[in-house]
Amino acid sequence: TQEIRIGFLSGSVDPIVYEDIIDQLAVLGKAGILWSSGALISTPAIVTYAKENGLFIQAFTIRDVVLVEELLAIGVYALITDTPLGVV
């Protein structure tokens, strides 16, 4: 049987919203969040809470190297971009 990972796409910075989403995903296991890069930079507590609950953390949409460095510094694991050569 093949396992499938579950992800959730959002950009909310409201703790009530993101904590509820993360709590639900944590129950499923093998889950992650795909969150707006702006929301993660402005509210790094989202990354902290997701990590504490064992979730994989991705950010979208990344278009420059400076933002890549900021996201890696707060603990984001993966990035989604529409300009691959602009972020390396």
Image: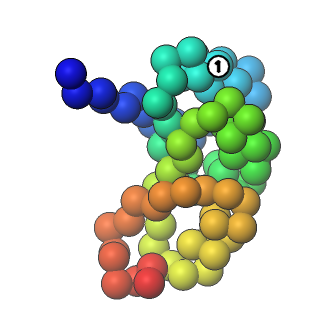
Where residue 48 appears, as percent x and y from the top left, is 76, 43
Q: Is residue 82 above or below residue 49?
A: below
Using the image, determine if residue 57 lies above or below residue 28: below
Q: Residue at 66% across / 51% down in the picture?
A: 40
77 is higher (above) or lower (below) than 26: below
Which one is nearer the viewer's eye here, 49 or 28? 28
Q: Position of residue 70 (x, y in %)?
A: 68, 70
Q: Residue at x 72, y 60 (%)?
A: 74
Q: Classify mark 1: residues with Cα within 10 Å, few (<14), some (14-19) or many (20+).
A: some
Name the residue tied to disc 1: 23
Residue most extreme to the front: 1
Q: Is residue 80 left or right of residue 21?
A: left
The local secondary structure at tag 1 comes to helix
Observer able to see residue 46? no
Q: Percent position (x, y) of residue 76?
A: 60, 56
Which of the colour schemes (rainbow, by chain, secondary structure, one colour) is used?
rainbow
Report if residue 26 is visible in the image: yes
Near-viewer residue (77 or 15): 77
Q: Is residue 50 left or right of residue 15?
A: left
Q: Of the residues shown, which amino acid type is indicated by label 1? A: Asp
In the image, residue 36 lies at what x, y percent? Answer: 54, 49
Quarter of the image for residue 2 reads: top left
Q: Split into 4 quadrants, where in the image is the N terminus?
A: top left
Q: Is residue 34 left or right of residue 45?
A: left
On the rendered structure, is 55 left or right of 43? Answer: left
Q: Residue at x 48, y 58 (%)?
A: 78
Q: Quadrant of the C terminus?
A: bottom left
Q: Quadrant of residue 3?
A: top left
What is the total number of numbered labels drawn onto the structure image? 1
